[in-house]
Image (cartoon, coloured by chain):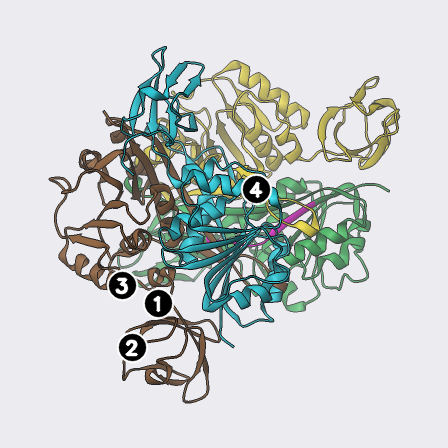
Chain colours: A green, B yellow, C brown, D cyan
Amino acid sequence: MSGLIEEGSYLLISSKKSDIYLVKVTQNGEFSTHEGKISFKDVIGKPFGTIAKTHLGAEYILFEPTISDFLKFTKRKTQVLYPKDLGFIILKLNIRSGKKMIECGTGSGSATSAFAFSLFPDGKLYSYEVRHEFTSLAKENIKRIGLENIVEFKNKDISEGFDETNVDALFLDVKFPEKYITHAYNALKPSGNMCIFVPTANQVTDVLKELQNYPFFLTEVIEIMLRNYKTIPERFRPDDTMIAHTGYLIFTRKVEK
Amino acid sequence: MSGLIEEGSYLLISSKKSDIYLVKVTQNGEFSTHEGKISFKDVIGKPFGTIAKTHLGAEYILFEPTISDFLKFTKRKTQVLYPKDLGFIILKLNIRSGKKMIECGTGSGSATSAFAFSLFPDGKLYSYEVRHEFTSLAKENIKRIGLENIVEFKNKDISEGFDETNVDALFLDVKFPEKYITHAYNALKPSGNMCIFVPTANQVTDVLKELQNYPFFLTEVIEIMLRNYKTIPERFRPDDTMIAHTGYLIFTRKVEK
Amino acid sequence: MSGLIEEGSYLLISSKKSDIYLVKVTQNGEFSTHEGKISFKDVIGKPFGTIAKTHLGAEYILFEPTISDFLKFTKRKTQVLYPKDLGFIILKLNIRSGKKMIECGTGSGSATSAFAFSLFPDGKLYSYEVRHEFTSLAKENIKRIGLENIVEFKNKDISEGFDETNVDALFLDVKFPEKYITHAYNALKPSGNMCIFVPTANQVTDVLKELQNYPFFLTEVIEIMLRNYKTIPERFRPDDTMIAHTGYLIFTRKVEK
Amino acid sequence: MSGLIEEGSYLLISSKKSDIYLVKVTQNGEFSTHEGKISFKDVIGKPFGTIAKTHLGAEYILFEPTISDFLKFTKRKTQVLYPKDLGFIILKLNIRSGKKMIECGTGSGSATSAFAFSLFPDGKLYSYEVRHEFTSLAKENIKRIGLENIVEFKNKDISEGFDETNVDALFLDVKFPEKYITHAYNALKPSGNMCIFVPTANQVTDVLKELQNYPFFLTEVIEIMLRNYKTIPERFRPDDTMIAHTGYLIFTRKVEK
């Protein structure tokens, strides 16, 4: 990345009140607010982090979006995963450049984006999804972050199993994950790491029961809570409300039979 | 990685009761437990994930350690950071292969390890620390995970500033971070991301006050809590106790003056 | 309480969808919903817990409100306290029939209501508030629960101190509690218990600093979080969002000089 | 209470380091520490809240114990309930002087103590327990707080139902609460409030399923977390560890058939 705003760049634009927007820079486009407009031709060639003024004089900051920003602005048709869970999953699944990974289902592509980010530049993600419209949406979301080469989207049912074997890591975010433990076991390399994400306690118990039938070991169930604080130094305190629950994270590791 | 245990490999060895150990495989070494011994020469050449038996017949599983395992077994002389915080920081700071990053201080090298992991193979971490013994310890911890080429350790005081400019991200874990905001600002590229980690609320307010004097924006303060659950499917419930606090995470972004 | 609905009774009316309303029964009044009306004259004389039908045939349940329901429906002009905090405060301050207690400020009277409830029938609460409109509002809220004899409202400034001495417990919920520690000390009996409620961390540190100048001891700072769960047995999981923060609770005890 | 220490009084004795002890004052007894002894005859007649010196000159503070202190020092053979849960339960169950309540099982008597405290002076608690040794232990714990007149201990099995009808509130803390929903329904007055305390998610789902067969309504499931903070004003932060889980609280209300 050159550090300069180009045609095709994405911008995280912040108002002085910290209202934020994710927009794509086009040659003749513009960013419109109730405080006036910013023409993209005026900002192309400037560094990210610059302050731009609307034609009415209001100031907006043009940040380079992070992967967390893209996750926040994932175009979605489903519940998406958050950085609090995804960052932890990445470190637990040991995902980085050079690794091969399977995820199912693709959904809107939020987890896909985070995994692709961590697999860059030489890893591979095989992302399964049975519903065409989600695969299309996820492809769009991945293209925004320029990581389409990392991901192979597979628009197919996994009831017959996965195409790959010997993958380093596997992430399951499906309604009945306990049905696919066999397939997951077969796809993983020995000592490979799996994470299963489920919203309900009932699903956790169903998965834990099923895992007992397989040589998986060191199973953990974890919940991560994130609390935002207000940033006024004289009145430091948590925000009034928070997300109370996204899901339970089940981690386990394949033992070679 | 070949997937086969070699001389020099690290093993995460788990007993049937889930007691875990991190050990390094040596040609003539052995792993001793109260249930007997496993000679490393008997396991070299086998795949990770294999079950090995001690000379008394007890079974142990030989997992390939993940970055999270290495973080758990960081040799430490200081409070270390945990995957719950580090995974989130990585996604918020947008760290991946190709990026340049500064951290200070190195400490025992737990954050160093996680950042190096995420910067692999083509990123760079400049890790500052004033105390020699910590730099040495951190180097040892980084060597275990084979990422010494990613990190340049700098055993020096930062009161005069950082040597680098235009870095993508910066992580501050020092006692009085408010003293180094100028230096951090100068080292970061425009739109660069900073995270400051502090244990106390007083430090947060000191940092928030100081940040008001600089063109940093979109400041957030966040706290992440992790809860482990028991994994008996018939009695699913949280563990009795948990870590209540590691620290507050302050995130902010550089605006170009 | 007779267990029968009377003129003047309060009802917690619940729809089949668990929408709830707190209403007062009047001789000629009625409860109107988009599903029809219930005339109060038809329910007077029936037991609480009965199902009533609107003139359109929709069913509503007529519960006897609890103190928690009244707290939830406190008419408010201020931030109010919740049962999660109030129940804990009551047990820590050791409040029950026979005890004398001071609170300041009265605010909308939510804490007042809970304290009066726990002091019933032979305790006394002296409730200070400098703003007339809040005292009036709180009086109204206390009358609803029939506990006006327990509370003596004092519409006055506490900068000159409290009128009472030797009280068993004292609750401070004011903007600058550190200013009134002397007065609180003087009002409390030896070994008396104080709770100070503040929303920000800065206020906590201000209070903790000031407490060091007085013979108060066994100081504790506590935060209570409450999480609601969804009640569908097949999909047991926490609600999506929760209250993240109400305030910090500081408890301390008077040592006799 | 006179406010003066008497023979038979309980004292919460705190060292200068905040180590605390709960002891009973006897005519010829003494309190022994590694810093010397305090003879009870020297403290009888003094007010609670006084500082006493050991014969070696060390200072200890003699506080009047609160109900929370007694709960903390409950002699126990079972897991006990904590003020964070008990205070909330009391406000949700609407327990105060004049009310009738059932609890089962008695266990070590921690919940019994808190309920008796809130029912004082004119309420009644019927406390069921099938194991003799627990009833004995609980009686001992209740006597310490002088509330034995509030509680009627019933050393019997509840599989045949409760002896009482028309009680205001009912608290179930048993292994298979779903077995006793009929009996609970029959014992409660219409609009009466029930709380069921269970440690595991599986138990919650079992109870929620069973409740669907009865005219109970406005069911809620709640979890309360308490976090202690360090009290050094210059380093305000949460404690390192906390209790992560005591149990899930299920609340529901009886609808008249």
On what subunit does the disc labeled 4 rest? D
Nearest to N terminus: mark 3 or mark 1: 1
Q: Which residue is mark 1?
A: C1
* In front: label 1 or label 4: 1
Same subunit, labels 3 and 4: the answer reads no
Q: Is residue A42 visible?
A: yes
Residue toward you, B225 or D156: D156
Q: Which residue is mark 3?
A: C146
Mark pair 2, 4: CA separation:
45 Å
On what subunit does the disc labeled 3 rest? C
Whether label 2 touches label 4, CB < 8 Å: no
- What secondary structure is found at the residue carrying circle 4? loop
Give x and y (percent) for residue D43.
31, 23
Q: Which residue is mark 4?
A: D79
| Quarter of the rendering containing residue D63 | top left
| Amino acid at dot 1 | Met
| Amino acid at dot 2 | Glu
Please check the rendered image and state whether residue A244 is part of the magenta-colored stretch, yes or no: yes
Same subunit, labels 2 and 4: the answer reads no
Mark pair 2, 1: CA separation:
13 Å
- Crowding at dot 4, Cα within 10 Å, few <14 / some 14-19 / many 20+, comes out as few
| Amino acid at dot 3 | Gly
Residue at horizontal 44%, vertical 43%?
Answer: B222
- Crowding at dot 3, Cα within 10 Å, few <14 / some 14-19 / many 20+, comes out as few
- Crowding at dot 2, Cα within 10 Å, few <14 / some 14-19 / many 20+, comes out as some
Give x and y (percent) for residue D249.
52, 54
Please check the rendered image and state whether residue B39 is part of the magenta-colored stretch, yes or no: no
| Quarter of the rendering containing residue C178 | top left
| Amino acid at dot 4 | Gln
Mark pair 2, 3: CA separation:
14 Å
